[in-house]
Image (cartoon, grey):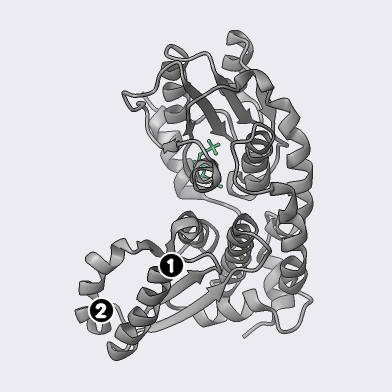
Amino acid sequence: MPGWKELLSLDGGRMLQTLREFPEQIERALGLSCRVPNGVQGFKNAVVLGMGGSAIAGDLLARFATVPVTTVRDYVLPPWVNADTLLIAISYSGETEETLQAFREGLRRTKRAVALTTGGALAALCEEQEIPWVPVPPGLPPRAALAFLLFPILGCFARLGCLRENPSRVPAALRPLRDACLPEHNENPAQALAQALCGQIPVVYGAGITAPVAYRWKTQINENAKQPAYWMELPELCHNEIVGYELAGKLFPQGVVIFLRTAFDHPRVAKRVEILKEVLTARGLAFQEVWGQGEDALAQALWLVHLGDWVSFYLALLNGVDPTPVRPIQELKRRLKEP
Ligand code: F6R
């Protein structure tokens, strides 16, 4: 098998470069939070409108905001969205039709709104309706721009007293992980995990703050490594998915469960994980456990996001594919534009 050095030549889209810069991107992105004016304050709830790599920012925000935040991945808004709602439209390209349509509808119900985008139709709509928008640096795959799609809003919520953590602590928590995951680093945790997952079907489990992180792992493995991956959250999976273990040993021998853990797991969730490990072992199913690091819950969640991004990157190389292109997504978007 070729070594990592040779495999890195598959990274035609230079995903490695953006992974390397993630902690510094977060610092730059926090600097952009001043582009969200204080005029939006006074909202009672917020909806994040977005899809895919842009929408995950809403899921993460929702776990740390002290006001209700809902992510809408759809053309239509929930009926409760009104003048007390802050609309946050996130679209890296600014061209995502679901996001644009929901944003247009939302602007008829509330004047509190902001967008994060590189430009496109979303920026044009904001200019036309005099809505503030945060300019996101262009030239990245949307999923690799997470720092710029999430941290300007986290910074704004922190400033307005609507966030339960300090986002400026995150870069320091991520730097040691970034350094350990660089290709030149021996005893590399991301390479080791990617090797353990190669040829397997990852099933990523999270709970509470790590539920959106588990979903991010799943989607990053799909898009970067071009392979199936699944996710689910505790405690809900203990009420349904667990029954599927009965035949999983026979029907799903390649399944590997990955438990995402933090020091902030609910004690009853922690107990459930221990029992689940025993159930999985008894059924002959493999599992891995990964613990987030950092001094607070936000840092630990982002630590796990960053590790998952690296794991999906190395898994792509082991699968012999360039992590960056997402041809099926582009093909679908192109076909939707056909008359
Ligand atoms: C991620 C990716 C997709 C897009 C999604 C929405 O890299 O390519 O998940 O994020 O199709 O597009 P944007 O983010 O441009 O609104």
**Can I make out residue 215 in this image?**
no
Q: Position of residue 308 (x, y in %)?
A: 57, 65
Q: Is residue 39 left or right of residue 246?
A: right
The residue positioned 23% from the left and 65% from the top of the image is 239
Q: Earlier in the sequence, mark 1 or mark 2?
A: 1
Residue on which the image places disc 2: 248
The residue positioned 49% from the left and 43% from the top of the image is 62
In the displayed structure, 74 sits above or below 256; it is above
**Can I make out residue 3 in this image?**
yes
Q: Classify residue 307 by image quadrant.
A: bottom right
Q: Classify residue 318 by image quadrant.
A: bottom right
What's under tag 2, amino acid-wise? Ala
Instruction: Name the residue nearer the viewer: 76 or 267.
Output: 267
In the displayed structure, 320 sits above or below 123; it is below
Tell me the quadrant of the picture where the C terminus can be found: top left
Q: CA distance from mark 1 to mark 2?
A: 15 Å
Q: Position of residue 333 (x, y in %)?
A: 44, 36
Tell me the quadrant of the picture where the N terminus can be found: bottom right
Element type at marker 2?
A: helix
Residue on which the image places disc 1: 204
Q: Is mark 2 within 8 Å of ligand 1?
A: no
What's under tag 1, amino acid-wise? Val
Q: Is residue 96 left or right of residue 22?
A: left
In the displayed structure, 4 sits above or below 323; it is below
